[in-house]
Amino acid sequence: MSAELDFIASLRPLATDPGARGLLDDTAVVDLGGTTLVLSHDMIVEDVHFLPTDPPADVAWKLVAVNLSDLAAKGARPLGVLMAYSLKHDTDWDAAFVAGLGKALSAFGLALFGGDTVALPPHAPRFLALTAIGRASGPVPSRSGARHGDAAWVSGTIGDAHAGLRIASGERNGADFLLERYRLPRPRLEAGQRLAPIVTAMMDVSDGLLLDIHRIAEASGVGAVIDLESVPLSDAYLTYAGDDRGARLSAERAGDDYELLFTASQDRAAEILALSEELGLPFSRVGRIEAGTGLRLLDRGEEIPLPPQLGYEHH
């Protein structure tokens, strides 16, 4: 078990309100008697989630988008945000960040409700935190509802953001599309709201598809099977990395995609595909839920060993 999981486990006895969902989900769900709020809180840290060379306006967009992605996976409509901001006495960086924040808030129709600031020592990495507040638009899916026999689906394409990170780091060249997928993720808000009533479990892909489907299976008390060949990859990623087993495994272990990963009964397939066409957003069936525990990985019908690391974890 990682240090992150150990720490979260130590907090569970304190999370006694039902809205905390046992700290097994990415959001809190608070019933206020007629209104259900969905709350998400995420941090991003320099040299962990973004590079010192990333444009400040893009960092602001990413801070907002990664929190809204959690709301999207719960089918919630975002209302506003609270922000914690670290000052490093760099007024140009601050100004560019604020301009980017304004653009992100405007794009998603959000209010800035308030927050806090703190001054950092000169050589400390920047850290930024946001609490996103949303209102449930209907059922609020959890990670824990997947059932034996369900199909597993994912929106969009997988692996693009990690390729974009490598491009931004100067490791190699690649398409601007990949760089944008890393710096400017798009939370699937409308898709999440439309899917929420028909899925059995849903979360966003933030730490890698393999790790996140494993989390759904574990929370639901079931097993999962992923078909390596069915996971959708963009043309830009295929040009960048190729289409062999290694390239596919790399994409499916990569984080920062912020696509929707969900499970649904087999008889919902036609409805899901019709919704995909209506939204202009691909939904791809990538595997299934089965009885038992753990994760299995298939490649052209053959079961293959799981990689040593399923995705990104804080150690």
Image (tube, rainbow, N blue to C red):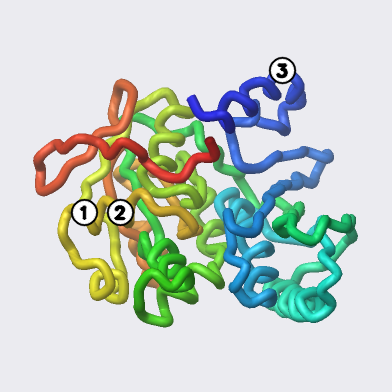
For the residue carrying disc 2, how many other residues have a C-alpha within 10 Å: few (<14), some (14-19), or many (20+)?
some
Upstream in sequence: badge 1 or badge 3: 3
Which secondary structure, mark 3?
helix
First of labels 3, 2 by sequence position: 3
Q: List x then y, in percent, for residue 135.
A: 73, 53
| Residue 146: x %, y % from top left | 42, 34
Q: CA distance from mark 2 to mark 1?
A: 6 Å
**111 is higher (above) or lower (below) than 152:** below
Residues under labels 3 and 2: Cα distance?
36 Å
User: Which residue is depicted at the point 88% across and 61% down?
Assistant: 113
Type of amino acid under label 1:
Gly
Establish if 276 lies above or below 49: below
Q: Which mark is residue 246?
A: 1
Label 1, label 3: how far apart the Cα atoms are = 41 Å
Identify which residue is drawn at 36% across, 43% down: 210
Q: Nearer the viewer, mark 3 or mark 2?
A: 2
Circles 2 and 1: CB atoms closer than 8 Å: yes
The residue identified by callout 2 is: 250
Element on which disc 2 rests: helix
Residue 127 seen anywhere in this rendered image of the structure: no
Q: Would residue 315 be found to the left or right of residue 146 on screen?
A: right
